[in-house]
Amino acid sequence: MNDRRISIPTFGRWLHPTDLRRIPHLFTDVLVIGGGIAGIRAAIAVPGDLSVQLITKDSVQISSSAWAQGGIAGVLDPMDEFAHHVADTISAGKGLCHTDVVDLVVTEAPQRIRELIGFGTEFDRIEGELALTLEGGHSHPRIAHALGDATGRELMRAMTTELMSRPSIEVFQQTFILDLVTIDGTCRGALTWNPDRGLVLIQASQTILATGGAGALYRETTNPSIATADGHAAALRAGCVLRDMEFMQFHPTVLYIAGSSRHLITEAVRGEGAHLRDCNGHRFMFDYSPDGELAPRDIVSQAITEQMARTAHPCVYLDLAPLGRDRVAARFPHITRVCADFGLNLATDRVPVRPGAHYMIGGTAVDSSGRTSIPGLWAAGEVTSSGLHGANRLASNSLLEGVVFGLRCGLNAAAAVTEQTDTRQIIRSVPGVADKHADHESLDVADLRSSLRSLMGRDVSIVRTAAGLESACSQLDFWASYVCRRTLNTPAGWELQNMLLAARAISAAALERRESRGVHFRADFPEPVESERNHIEVCCAAENLT
C-alpha cells in the first residue's frame, strides 16, 4: 500500500502559548497522559526503579474504557484458534489491517487476559470456566465479559487498584494536557493545567499518549463528554502524523430517547440472539447481509441508517423477546436498569435504538512497538492508528488493543529511559506568541460546541458526500479562524479548539478517500476501489510547526 499524506491548517502551534521559564516544572522518567486501560497498563508496565507520572483530565474512574460493556476478545476456548481470530479481524478491517500487528495482538490476547485476572479482574464464569460469548463479526465465542454487561467498569476497578498500589507512580487527576513540548523535534514532556496548581510543565525522558477517542465530536455518541480528541489535536500541533482519521466507527445500537443521554446497548445483545426490527415490525437485517444481526458493525450501522430513511422513522428497535426474561436479567443487568429508568422492560418491550459515534479508529500512526513519528513520544489505545483495526474495528478488540499496546509502550519507553543521559535537561526555549491573542471578546463556547457536533452529525457521519464534506471543511475553517487564534483560559475552551482541529482532520481525510470502505461510506463513491486501498495520513501545514 502506498500511503497518501495531506496537510491541514492548525491555526497555531500552541493551544496556550506560555513562557515555560516562568511556570513550575516537574520531572519524571515516564509521563503517561491518559487514565484509561491503555494508560494504566502502560504506567504499571514501567519498572519500579523509574519514576512515572500519570495525568488524566477527569478522575481515573471516568474514561471510555470504563464505559465498555461487551468485553475483551481472545482465543480462550479449545475449539477456537488464533487463525480464526486473525481471519475475523482482517475480514472486518476491509483490506487495511496490518497483518503483522493483527498476529501480534491476537497471539498475545490470552496472556494479557490472564494478567488482568491476576490484577483482580472478576470475569463472569460458568462452572468455574470463563463465560465466553459471541459478538458480530466473530466466528467463535471468544468474548470474556464481567458483571454481565459492565466489563469496562470491572476492568478499570481492578486496574486502578493495581495502579494506586505502585509507589513509583504519581497520579494527577483533573489535569488537562495543553500541548506536547518538543525540543529539536524530540518530545520532552507536556504543558499541563490543573485547577489547583495552574500551568505546570512536566518534563519527561519519555512520554506516552493514551488520551482516548473523539466521540464527543458527535451529538449521537456512546462516549463520555470528555472524549474530545485532546491527544489527537496535541499530537497534530506538535508535528505528529495522524492516520486513518476518516474511520470513525459508529455503534449500531445506542438507546434513543429524546432528552436523555445516549446509552450504549452492547453488541452482545445481538450476539445472544436479539432481533432488529423497523417501526413496522419487520426484521430487516437479512435484507442487507446473510449474517443478519451478526454482521460487522459497519454493515449494521449502514443498514439501520438506510432502514430509517426508507421508513421515515428516527430509529429502529431491538427485540430481546427471543432471549427470555431470565436470560436477559442475568446477562444484561446494567442495560435492564437503564431501560427501566425510562419505563422500558428490556425483556419484553421493543427498545428504540439508532447508531452513534463509538470508536475512533484513526489517530497517531504507531509501529508495533507503540512508537509515533516523534522521537520520545509513544502512544497506545484509541488515540492511535496501530494497524489492528483497518477500516472497521472488530467488536471487543479495543480493550485488547489497549492492554497489548499499553504494555508494549510502558516497557519500550522504560528501555529508552535507561539509554538516555539527558533525562533532566532544562527546557529554556519559549514558544512564540505572535500568532495568538488574548480572548478579550467573549465566545459562547457551549453554542459553538453544539454547532460543531450538529455539523459532524449532518455532514461527516455514516453517509458522506463530497458536497457535505467540502461544506464541513469550509465551516470548520471559518470557526477555527476566530476560535483557534485566541488564547482561551478554560478546559471547555481548550476542548472546543481541540475538537475543531480533530474534526477538520476527519473531514479532510474523508474527503480525500474517494471510495467506500469499512466504516467510511461515500454515497457518491459507494463501492471500494482497489487503487484507494491505502492509508491517508494527516499532518499540519509546515507553517504551523513554529
Image (cartoon, rainbow, N blue to C red):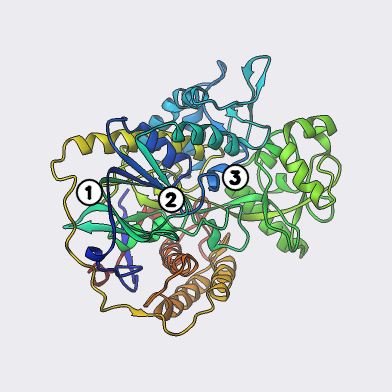
Residue 522 visible? The answer is: no
- Relative height, residue 75 to residue 518 (above, below): above
| Circle 3 crowding by C-alpha within 10 Å: few under 14, some 14–19, many from 20 | many
Left or right position of 368 against 388: left
x, y percentage for residue 60? 50, 45
Determine the residue positioned at 78% across, 53% down: 278
Q: Which residue is mark 1?
A: 375
Callout 2, which amino acid? Answer: Thr
x, y percentage for residue 418? 19, 35
Picture disc at residue 98: none
Left or right position of 114 against 220: left
Determine the residue positioned at 41% across, 62% down: 509
Pick whichever, 206 or 102, lies toward us: 206
* Nearer-N-terminus badge (2/3): 3
Determine the residue positioned at 29% across, 78% down: 435
x, y percentage for residue 403? 44, 34
Pick whichever, 279 or 415, lies toward us: 415
Callout 3, which amino acid? Answer: Trp
What separation in Å lies between label 2 and label 3 (alpha carbons)?
A: 15 Å
Q: Which residue is mark 2?
A: 211
What separation in Å lies between label 1 and label 3 (alpha carbons)?
A: 32 Å
- Relative height, residue 16 to residue 55 (above, below): below
Circles 1 and 3, Cβ within 8 Å, touching? The answer is no
Picture disc at residue 67: 3
Callout 1, which amino acid? Answer: Pro
Circles 2 and 1, Cβ within 8 Å, touching? The answer is no
Q: Is disc 3 placed on a helix, strand or loop?
A: helix
